[in-house]
Amino acid sequence: MRIPRLLGTAGAAALLAAALSMPAQMPAYAADMANTQLKDASGKAVGDVDLTQTATGVLIRLSVKGLTPGEHAFHVHAVGKCEAPFESAGPHFNPGNHKHGMMFGEGHAGDMPNLHVPQSGELSVEVFNPAITLAKGKPNSLLDNDGSALVIHAKADDYKSDPAGNAGDRIACGVIQESGATVGASPAKK
Ligand code: ZN
């Protein structure tokens, strides 16, 4: 490919480069990606999660192993602190001050569908949450002053019982951390 010499051509090339590096239109203050490692109460790693900002919400890619087969509630909690038994992570992330559960009303921003873990105890799944963002400074940002955490519970979320879906103990927790991969910036951690 020839090196463009005209300003107009260079501009078009820059636009193309921007379009190829997703997401292209994030403002400078926004984190594009975040991640966490989920650990159980004994400190053992039981999963990895990558979070990616999109134009309309956050794509959450989750991979867990060694979990009890069955349904488990999966939520964003309000505080980025995971000390067993993980009450430290606070209640469900709820910047809109709503009641819990998608079958009740608007639900918490941190409410998400249950994970159905098969007999192997291993599960890889993608979840999309349109109610949260990685963009700092927004009311629904996961990267706010006290951070946030992803929590897996012992039981299923019934999607209606306030404030936590009657989901039982917190069995795994991970503090959400900015990956630092902003467009045009070095991938080094901040
Ligand atoms: Zn909730």
Image (cartoon, rainbow, N blue to C red):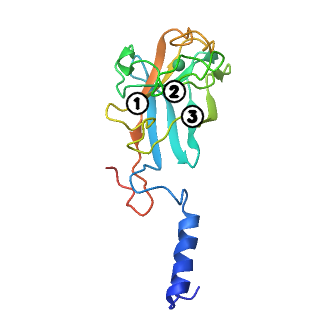
Q: Secondary structure at mark 2?
A: loop
**Residue 189 seen in the figure:** yes
Q: CA distance from mark 1 to mark 3?
A: 16 Å
> Sequence order check: which comes first, mark 2 or mark 1?
2
Q: Are marks 2 and 1 in contact (CB under 8 Å)?
A: yes
- Cα–Cα gap, marks 3 and 2: 15 Å
Q: Which residue does the numbered mark 3 point to in the structure image?
A: 62
Q: Earlier in the sequence, mark 1 or mark 3?
A: 3
Determine whether the residue tagged by mark 3 lies in a helix, strand or loop: strand
Residue identified by numbered label 1 = 148
Q: Which of labels 3 and 2 is toward the front?
A: 2
| Residue on which the image places disc 2 | 110
Q: Residue at x 51, y 41 (%)?
A: 51
Q: Amino acid at mark 3?
A: Leu
Q: Is residue 69 visible?
A: no
Q: Nearer the viewer, residue 167 or 105?
A: 105
Amino acid carrying mark 1 in the image: Ser
